Image (cartoon, rainbow, N blue to C red):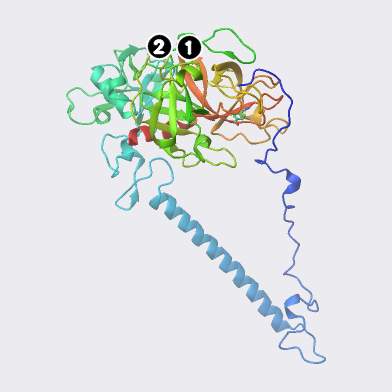
Amino acid sequence: MHDKQTYGNSYDNTGFQHDDSKPPPYIPQQDVYTNLPNYVITPQFVGSHPAAGPGTPYYTEQSRKKCTLKFTFAIVAFVIAVLIAIGVLVWYYVFFRCFLGRPCRVGGRCLNRAQWCDGVRDCPDGEDERRCFRLLGIDSILGSYESDRSTWMPVCADGWDDNYGREACAMMGFNRQDFVSYSRVSAGSLGSNGYLKLEPGSNPDSGLRSRLTHSETCSAGVVALTCIECGQSLAAPNTRIVGGTEAVNGAWPWQVSLQISGQHVCGGSIIRSSWILSAAHCFGRNSDPARWRVHSGDVSLFRMNFESGSRVSKIISHEGYNSGTNDNDIALLKLTTPLTFTDTRKPVCLPNDGINISPGHRAWISGWGSLRQSGPSPNILNQAQVTIYSRETCNAPAVLNGGVTRNMLCAGELQGGVDTCQGDSGGPLVVKEGNSWWLAGDTSWGIGCALRNKPGVYGNVTYFMDWIAEQLLNE
Ligand code: 4AZ
């Protein structure tokens, strides 16, 4: 965590090619093959024309016809090859792999859209009935995917109870034991296209999704769910602080220290009692779960290291992580034994759809990373407030020069002086919306630390929500 402005050397950004390093554009030569006068000698005939004898011209009417024929044949062959390639691609994506959405084939054909989230398991692994529920906005309103209309709709609270709530939460990858409660709230504009409502008298043994049918009206408000108590801080600062300051216990209770042989290596965030979210690049060289310990529940590394920490049973790095570009820099750690939550050890909320993480929004970063580039690291957790910038701002040539992809989020202070640094990686970037703190990013990369015009880059957690749900559901 940086608390001071430094103007050290910066790394070259290799994620972008200047135009002048690209090959020049292809400029077609006009009429190279057509309209050739008879006496022009084309290279393939020089000295090798079979009809050419002493005193005879190299180029004859016959050879000109032959040449045109060859050329026509080449064009036809090329067009056929392109058509075959297009045909293979269409077959591969439409019928074999399924181009969009839930990739599953039934009877050799890609599953029809109307069969997603219709309550019937069509795919062998039930892929078509996964990700059919999600939470919307700061109220965590339950939404379900309506395949007939290809849209998400709020669930009406008519006939709802806690057991349905628990089931919906479990289908989104939450633990049933973590379920807190459901409440009824006003749908507002969310209900403008109608609702999904429990059908009275539907078979209680069939899946929840198959019991929901479309309805234009809803008399009891819509369902809001607290699937886990999350994002509650005892002592988060509420004043603006420039540069880093020391955090107090309970301010960021989701912050963990990921260690190897008693040494802090990376940060991470508690998202469930058995799951830590961190950055994939932390595990490039150290992918063996047995080497890692997860320390939590205190701002002091020294005090935490009196205890042995939690063991890790599995490390899931994003399969699309690219160490060259830092694309998809996210990982999940499964703990051998679930954590017991306390005032200083609690999960952060994962971002619901519709949580405001837009440019200009203020966010907080925390970590035990170095206090300046190549500088010392603190024993006490540091915290700082940063501004979220748009991808356009960050991708400007003078800033991060095109290195920020859709699955990254960029935040800091353009004037420099506040930033994450080495050792903060994997740790949280959080925003407060409503009464809760939401995990917007995981610390990923940057050019130096706290340099002017070099904000830090974070994994965009919202972008990875489907990936996260998939990993939690698979376990
Ligand atoms: C690092 O080396 C690192 N300024 C993390 C974040 C930033 C720079 C470096 C962002 O882990």
- Front one among 442 and 115: 442
In space, the residues marked 1 and 2 are separated at their CA atoms by 9 Å
Q: Within the image, what quadrant is residue 228 found in?
A: top left
- Residue 232 location in percent, x, y? 43, 13
Residue occupying the far bottom of the picture: 54
The amino acid pointed to by label 2 is Asp
Q: Say which element carries label 1.
A: loop
- Residue 338 location in percent, x, y? 34, 25
Q: Ligand 1 is found in which quarter of the picture?
A: top right
- Residue 394 location in percent, x, y? 65, 29
Residue 468 in sight = yes
Specify whether tag 1 is near ligand 1 (CB below 8 Å): no
- Residue 444 location in percent, x, y? 56, 31
Q: Which residue is drawn at 61% across and 34% down?
A: 404
The amino acid pointed to by label 1 is Asn
Give the position of the N terminus as an image quadrant.
Answer: top right
Marker disc for residue 343 = 2
Residue 214 in sight = no
Q: Within the image, what quadrant is residue 26 found in?
A: bottom right
Which residue in the structure is indicated by mark 1? 249
Contact between labelled residues 2 and 1, with CB atoms less than 8 Å apart: yes
